Amino acid sequence: MRKSTWDAGPKQDRFDPVAGQKTMQAVVTAGNGGYHQLQCREVRLPELEPGEVLLQVLAAGVNNTEINTRVGWYSSSVTTGTEDAATVEEQLTTEKADGGWNESTPFPFIQGTDCCGRIVAVAPGGDESTIGSRVLVRACMRRSDFTSMDNIWMGSDFDGAFAQFVKVPAGEVFAVDCDWSDAELATIPCAYGTAENMVHRSKVSKGEHVLVAGASGGVGSAVVQLAKRRGATVTAIAGRAKREQVLALGADRVLDRDDNVVDCLGENAVDVVIDNVAGPAFGDHLKALKRGGRYVSSGAIGGPLVTLDMRTLYLKDLTLFGSTAWDEPVFPNLISYIERGELRPLVAKTFPLEQIAEAQRAFLEKKHVGNFVLIPPPLR
């Protein structure tokens, strides 16, 4: 999908430019399907509503969730991992009413969950002193309050950061004071927010042994750092070619993804399993847990359907955590870790926004460690 120009022609949808109205460049996802659904377009500039701010997007990260949403992976009809589902959808487009993060996906819309941006405008009555601040957006938003698990996600439930500008609720932006580049900051929201939420919710503590599956990915590499920050011993699972890079993040031991976890560690060996891979290894991960151990997941890139022996669950008094809605301390904690120099950003590669298809193809190859980041075109 490499392009040198952006398509300014009307598509007969809500993004069509209107005479006299300001525009921006964005990638609009038209529907479920392959890369052809990613349309590089000139679209309307977002109009602020009360309580919102307008951000110039400086950098936007690439995540599994954008691919999952585009291909409809969240549908109950999909039983394979992300890579296989993406391959099928590239060959055969299938609309999936239940394929979205929460309910049906609001196609056409602008994806992009990770945003490092600069506040350029506030709605009437907003705090104009924030204009000019470089911020990160808390992508997971609780619509009620933190006593309810009801949540929506930027770039999945409403328009996100794959554009030159994005509007968001003022309470969901967090100024950050650090010397990181825009691209480095754009690796944080989804991957590190998801990772910190799992580490927080499973109560990882000093001296515990944590097993991290998929440790070279964006979320997994963040988990390694965040678990080590809390004083845990970390055994990571990653491809053999990425072993040294994962060790450099702080992992105490790295198992190859083809290794049998129980053969390597034994049963009853770890306190916590943090697993965004799932698939066939799920049962062995539970066997590796000690009595009273905790298992937490926020994804299943290796396959969403697993085999659970209920005897393992109840005889070992295990606790299983699902982790989607971020808890209240998670994002403020991340900002403080960045500002204190306690995290390491991992930018695997940057791409111009219009090369989003190339970025997502490379992302699915899983040859990288860390995160890919898209850079929007400069303002005209």
Image (cartoon, helix red, strand yellow):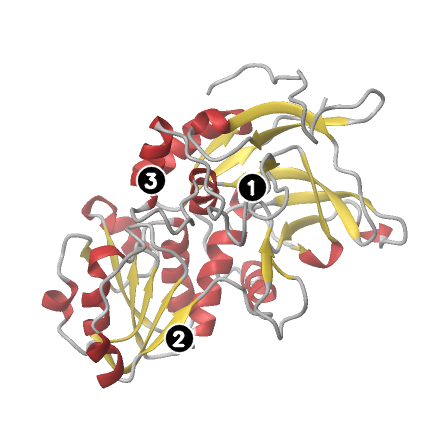
Disc 1 vs disc 3: which is toward the camera? 3
Task: Return the disc, 2 or 1, that comes first in the chain's sequence.
Answer: 1
Q: Which mark is residue 85?
A: 3
SS of the residue under disc 2: loop
Asked whether 81 or 54 is in front, the reply is 81
Asked whether 17 or 232 is in front, the reply is 17
Amino acid type, mark 1: Gly
User: Percent x, y for residue 81?
Assistant: 30, 47
Q: Where does label 1 land, which residue?
A: 112
Q: Farthest residue to the left: give it.
A: 263
Amino acid type, mark 3: Ala
Q: Residues within 10 Å of mark 1 (few under 14, many from 20)?
A: many
Along the horizontal axis of the image, is 123 left or right of 346? right
Q: Where does label 2 land, which residue?
A: 204
Q: Is residue 126 above or below residue 68?
A: below
Is residue 366 visible to us here? no
Gap in angstroms between the C-alphas marked 2 and 3: 33 Å
Q: Is residue 351 above or below residue 192?
A: above
Task: Return the disc, 1 or 3, that comes first in the chain's sequence.
Answer: 3
User: Percent x, y for residue 89?
Assistant: 37, 33
Q: Is residue 12 above or below residue 163?
A: above
User: Percent x, y for residue 20?
Assistant: 85, 22
Amino acid type, mark 2: Val
Q: Residues within 10 Å of mark 2 (few under 14, many from 20)?
A: many
Q: Residues within 10 Å of mark 3 (few under 14, many from 20)?
A: many
Q: Residue at x 57, y 68 (%)?
A: 149
